[in-house]
Amino acid sequence: MLRSESVQAWATKVLMGALVGFPIINYEFSLSFWQPFGSVWDKLVLLFLALIAWRRHRQGRRADGFAWRKYAGWYILYCAALVLVGLKYPVLALNGFSVDVEYIVLGMLLPFVVDSQDIGKYAYGMVSVSILLGVHGVFQYIMKVPIPSSWLDVGEHVRTRVFSVIRSPAELGANMEMMIPFMFAMLLYDRHRVRQWIYFLGGLCCVATLLFTYDRGSWMGFGVSMVVIAVVYERRLLIAFAGLCIIAFFIPSIHHRIADLFNFVYLIKSAQGGRVMLWQTAFNVMSRDPLFGVGLGQYGGSIAASHSLSVYSDNYYAKILGESGLVGLVLFISMHIAIVREIIVTVVRRATGRDRYIALAGLAAVCAVLVHSFVENLFEYSPTALEYFMLVGLLLLWGRTLPAPHSNSAEAFPGSA
């Protein structure tokens, strides 16, 4: 029995470790003779984790699910109903369902497979992977890595746009906007000098990589989230953030990229063939069936694009609206509101002292992705969706280990020992 439990614990750590290193492992799958498994290996990992959770439940090891799971459950059930309705196009419906709910299921599974003593290890692993991506991004910028002309506006000239192993500036930017707050939070949290230097230097590389993606959606997500967190919880952050903005604004290529947003010609082009037009199209598609949309996989994302049914919506909320209607959008947004609320109630409000740095970093990371999703199909990309729900799960599990008010004991976060 003990041997069985030790094997089970070992398997869980291996599977979770694979997900922590997802960007790098997924990239390797795309290059090697294992390429045919590149699109299914993460699904197999999820299946094995579900089996481990079931086995632990059978062994009497109970765990409390997250409060947001009921909203996620309603969204998943609704999507499953849309699959049944859309069986006229089974491939589209099933693929659309997989894209929309796969990593939501992962987030819901975490309380049943992650032990409290391992939370810090996985979180530290996520930060380490992002530091590697940040260093690689800086290297790509120095080497002037070639990029497609479609990644630049007409008449725009930049050295390059970095993308690392994720292969998309927007998705690399999403990774950076989530993990940069954690790096500097750990810098303030930790007391180990060597690790502090790793967080500091790694954080600087990641900030540089975020800028060098030249992705305005990532900048917006990071900026809005930091301003909101600063105004509501820690106004001293405004000074550091203002300094970063001033420095970035005086870099010519960044200044040009931001100034374009306020250019009348840019706005006209956006309305004629850019994001504004795409968002209007989503509303028109939804209007055909306002409550239930046109069906999973049939609008606004990679599945629809691969079948020449539509282009990308460049707004994940618009994609949800077009393919699953107002009902789907309300359920999806309700799930994320529940996530934010649970983080505030069970983590931010309970965190004191140095714990508060970690709590606010987690809230900033979640808010950054939700804001960024207004201009990008973020949750459709495996690296971003996986990281988001894993980060949410680990943060909430850590919040459960925080001491009650006026208590002096808590689980250590990574690097605090």
Image (cartoon, rainbow, N blue to C red):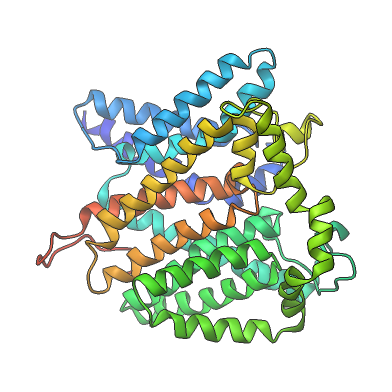
* Residue situated in front as seen by the camera: 141 or 245: 245
* Residue situated in front as seen by the camera: 84 or 64: 84
Percent x, y of residue 393 = 37, 47
- The number of numbered discs placed on residues in the rendered structure image is 0
Q: Residue at x 65, y 37 (%)?
A: 38
**Residue placed farthest to the right in the image?**
155
Residue 300 visible, this orientation: no
- Image position of 174 with respect to 79: above or below: below
| Horizontal relation, residue 400 to residue 179: left or right | left
Q: Residue at x 33, y 64 (%)?
A: 359
Residue 255 visible, this orientation: yes
| Horizontal relation, residue 260 to residue 333: left or right | right
**Residue placed farthest to the left in the image?**
406
Q: Residue at x 23, y 52 (%)?
A: 400
Percent x, y of residue 259 = 74, 75
* Residue situated in front as seen by the camera: 120 or 307: 307
* Residue situated in front as seen by the camera: 379 or 111: 379
| Horizontal relation, residue 351 to residue 122: left or right | left
Q: Residue at x 20, y 59 (%)?
A: 402
Can you say which quadrant of the picture contains the C terminus? bottom left
- Image position of 189 with respect to 61: above or below: below
Percent x, y of residue 239 = 46, 85
Give the quadrant of residue 152: bottom right
Percent x, y of residue 192 = 33, 78
- Image position of 157 with respect to 21: above or below: below
Give the quadrant of residue 213: bottom right
Can you say which quadrant of the picture contains the N terminus? top left
